[in-house]
C-alpha cells in the first residue's frame, strides 16, 4: 500500500482570468510535517483549498488518500484549521462545544451525540493540554489557547492529516515555540501528516520535516535543512534575503517585495 497522502500533478487555478497557481506538482507522504511558505498572494491558501476539495482546479490532477480531492470518503480524514477559525468570540459557546463541532463529520448533524463522542472530545482537549478549560467560554481564552482549542476541534474527527493556515497569527511570540512543539508531538502521537502555511521562515525549518516554496509556481520542495538557501528564497519572494545569526538560531530577513 502506498504511503502517498497528497499527489498533485500539473495544477492550474485561475481567478478572474488571472493565474493563482500554475504548473504545480507536489507529493506529500504519510507522516511528513510540511511547511508551506511564500509571499502574500502566492497561492498558499488556494493550494490548501484545492487539497481540501473546496476549490476546483482549471487543469491538473489532485489525489488525496488515493481519491479525487473532495471525495466524500475523505470526510473526517482531514482536520482543517483556517486562518480565522472562529469569527465571533463573543458568542456564548464553551471550549467543549467548539471541539464537539469537529465530531460532526463523523456523527452527522442530525445524529445524537453519544458518550463515546464526548470521551473523544475530552481526549483531544487533553492532547492539546486544554481539558482544564473545557467549560470556559471560548472568547475568554488567549490567542494561543484559542488556537489549541481549534486544533482539538480539527482533531475531533480522528483525521489522518492536519492542515493549518497561518495558525500562529495572533499568537504572541512566547506561545509560538510551545505551539510548534505541540504540533510536532501530535504528529508523532497521532501518526499525522501535517501541512502548515506560515510566513515565519526563520522558525519553520526547525519544526518541519520538509518545506515547499510557493509563489504561484512551486519553486522548491525538499528537506527543511536543504531548501532554505538565500538563492532559493530570492526566487520565491523576488527579493534579497539576508541571513542574520542571533543566539543559536539564524534568522532570515526578507526585504521589500511587490506582488
Image (tube, rainbow, N blue to C red):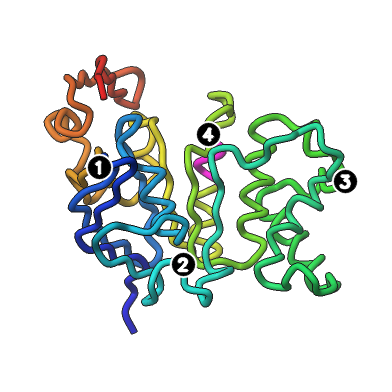
Count of numbered marks: 4
For discs 4 and 1, the disc positioned in front in the rendered view: 1
Q: CA distance from mark 4 to mark 2?
A: 26 Å
- Pointer 4 or 2: first along the chain: 2
User: Is residue 90 shown to the viewer in this render?
Assistant: yes
101 horizontally vs 154: left or right: right
Query: Badge 3 local density, few (<14 within 10 Å), some, or many (20+)?
Result: few
Q: Which mark is residue 159?
A: none
- Pointer 2 or 3: first along the chain: 2
Q: CA distance from mark 2 to mark 3?
A: 34 Å
Residue occupied by mark 3: 135
Q: CA distance from mark 4 to mark 3?
A: 24 Å
Residue range (magenta) = 178-182
Residue occupied by mark 4: 168
Toward the bottom, the furthest residue is 1
Q: CA distance from mark 4 to mark 1?
A: 28 Å
Q: CA distance from mark 1 to mark 3?
A: 46 Å
Q: Which mark is residue 70?
A: 2
Seen at 26% across and 39% down, the residue is: 18
Q: Locate residue 19, reporting x and y percent.
A: 25, 42
Query: Badge 1 local density, few (<14 within 10 Å), some, or many (20+)?
Result: few
For discs 4 and 2, the disc positioned in front in the rendered view: 2
Amino acid at each position: 500500500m502506498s504511503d502517498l497522502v497528497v499527489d498533485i500533478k500539473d495544477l492550474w487555478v485561475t481567478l478572474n482570468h488571472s493565474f493563482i497557481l500554475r504548473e504545480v506538482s507536489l507529493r506529500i507522504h504519510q507522516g511528513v510535517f510540511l511547511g508551506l511558505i511564500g509571499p502574500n498572494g502566492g497561492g498558499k491558501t488556494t493550494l490548501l483549498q484545492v487539497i481540501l476539495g473546496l476549490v476546483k482546479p482549471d487543469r491538473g490532477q489532485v489525489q488525496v488518500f488515493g481519491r479525487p480531492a473532495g471525495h466524500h470518503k475523505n470526510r473526517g480524514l482531514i482536520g482543517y484549521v483556517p486562518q480565522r477559525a472562529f469569527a465571533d468570540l463573543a458568542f456564548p459557546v464553551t471550549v467543549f462545544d467548539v471541539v464537539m463541532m469537529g465530531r460532526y463529520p463523523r456523527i452527522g448533524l442530525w445524529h445524537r451525540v453519544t458518550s463515546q463522542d464526548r470521551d473523544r472530545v475530552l481526549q483531544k482537549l487533553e492532547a492539546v493540554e486544554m481539558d482544564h478549560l473545557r467549560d470556559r467560554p471560548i472568547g475568554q481564552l488567549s490567542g494561543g489557547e484559542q488556537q489549541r482549542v481549534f486544533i482539538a476541534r480539527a482533531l475531533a474527527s480522528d483525521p489522518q492529516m492536519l492542515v493549518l493556515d497561518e495558525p500562529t497569527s495572533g499568537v504572541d511570540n512566547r506561545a509560538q515555540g510551545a505551539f510548534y512543539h505541540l504540533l510536532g508531538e501530535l504528529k508523532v502521537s497521532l501518526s499525522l501528516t501535517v501541512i502548515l502555511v506560515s510566513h515565519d521562515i526563520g522558525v519553520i525549518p526547525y519544526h518541519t520535516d520538509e518545506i515547499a516554496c510557493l509563489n504561484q509556481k512551486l519553486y522548491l520542495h525538499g528537506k527543511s535543512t536543504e531548501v532554505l538557501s538565500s538563492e532559493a528564497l530570492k526566487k520565491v519572494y523576488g527579493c534579497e534575503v539576508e541571513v542574520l545569526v542571533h543566539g543559536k538560531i539564524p534568522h532570515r530577513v526578507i526585504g521589500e517585495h511587490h506582488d
